[in-house]
Image (cartoon, helix red, strand yellow):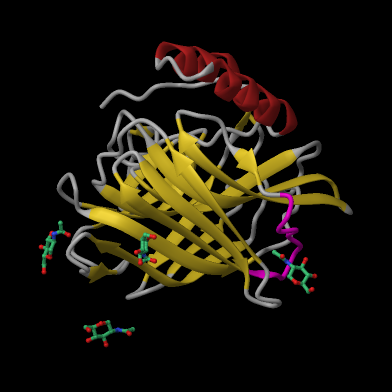
Amino acid sequence: MQFLTVTFVHALLVASALALPSSTGEHLAKRADSFQRPSQPVQLVKSPAGDSHGVAASNWAGVVLNSASGTYTFATGTFKVPTPSEPQNSWGTHAASAWVGIDGYDCASAVLQAGVALTVAAPSLTTYTAWYQWYPYTAVPVYDVPVHANDVVRLSVNATSPSAGVVTIENLTTGKSAQHDVAGPELCQKSAEWVVEQYAVWGVPAPLADFHTVAFTDATASGTNGTVAGPADDAAVVVNLVQNGKVVTKVMAGNDTVEIDYVNAN
Ligand SMILES: *[C@@H]1O[C@H](CO)[C@@H](O)[C@H](O)[C@H]1NC(C)=O
Ligand SMILES: *[C@@H]1O[C@H](CO)[C@@H](O)[C@H](O)[C@H]1NC(C)=O
Ligand SMILES: *[C@@H]1O[C@H](CO)[C@@H](O)[C@H](O)[C@H]1NC(C)=O
Ligand SMILES: *[C@@H]1O[C@H](CO)[C@@H](O)[C@H](O)[C@H]1NC(C)=O
């Protein structure tokens, strides 16, 4: 399995290689200037010796439904935004991003995602930003849906065709929501996933914040034939985040729930 590592510059190269109108390129550049937090497909690594928790990755943890090409068109999940903190005995800016997506697991060409990025720069200096992304294009912030700790947010991605879709970010407290049309290189529609990611800022992974718990409820995915599947489906793969040879997450899958806990490995 080989995945593209995409930085802002690469994203622009991809955009020009695909011969998008230059205004689109400029638009991407503007977006990238304001929000440089591209999310990435899973980067699988060898599980640490003695670990039997499932599959290990260097950049994210969660549950993946993994099936044949063309299976998934829709994925959704609802979670209460946690307050991130700096891990014990660790200082400086830390980050994590919770998202729902299609094709983050085994599709080289594209990933469709909606998420909330969390950063903590000091105990009382936290930021929360909703975003969506059609990888390999960069993430787009959704400032019209402000997010705070303890908000209940529903994230949904809907691939209306392999190369276009709609993302919806909703505040279930007020009913305020944002819906955006998205398009990009063809999806494989092979996987649907609920994830917490350690994301990179300008290509450099920001240290992982202690995100405590991201507990997705109403976590379901469906396909072109309307089949609804959940995280306890036969196709489910549990992925844990491994840093310095240690598993730093605990992931639990239920019928329509995915709980991802931060575990301090220090
Ligand atoms: C949801 O609404 C609450 C109450 O007005 C507000 O504090 C919060 O910022 C909103 N969150 C989102 C995600 O819009
Ligand atoms: C996805 O979008 C299509 C087109 O707008 C719509 O018909 C369909 O109901 C949506 N799917 C879900 C699960 O919301
Ligand atoms: C359609 O549903 C069946 C199970 O009912 C499932 O095995 C198959 O993968 C689904 N196909 C698509 C394209 O969703
Ligand atoms: C999950 O779904 C199965 C099959 O529908 C059901 O038997 C089981 O009780 C459900 N478990 C939970 C925790 O809801």
Where residue 108 appears, as percent x and y from the top left, is 30, 29
The kind of secondary structure the magenta stretch mainly shows is: loop
Report the number of numbered marks: 0
Q: Which of 173 and 60 is in front in this view?
A: 173
Check the picture and name the quadrant holding the N terminus: top left
> From the viewer's perspective, is 255 left or right of 207?
left
In the figure, 134 relative to 170: above or below?
A: above
**On screen, residue 248 above or below 21:** below
Q: In this view, does 263 lie above or below 25?
A: below
Left or right of residue 99, residue 63 in this image: left
Residue 54: tell me if it is visible.
no
Q: What quarter of the picture does the C terminus occupy?
A: top right
Q: In which quarter of the image is residue 171?
A: bottom right
Q: Tell me the quadrant of ligand 2.
A: bottom left
**148 in the magenta segment:** yes
Task: Tell me if residue 239 can be seen.
Answer: yes
Task: Identify the residue shown where x is 64% and y is 61%.
Answer: 212
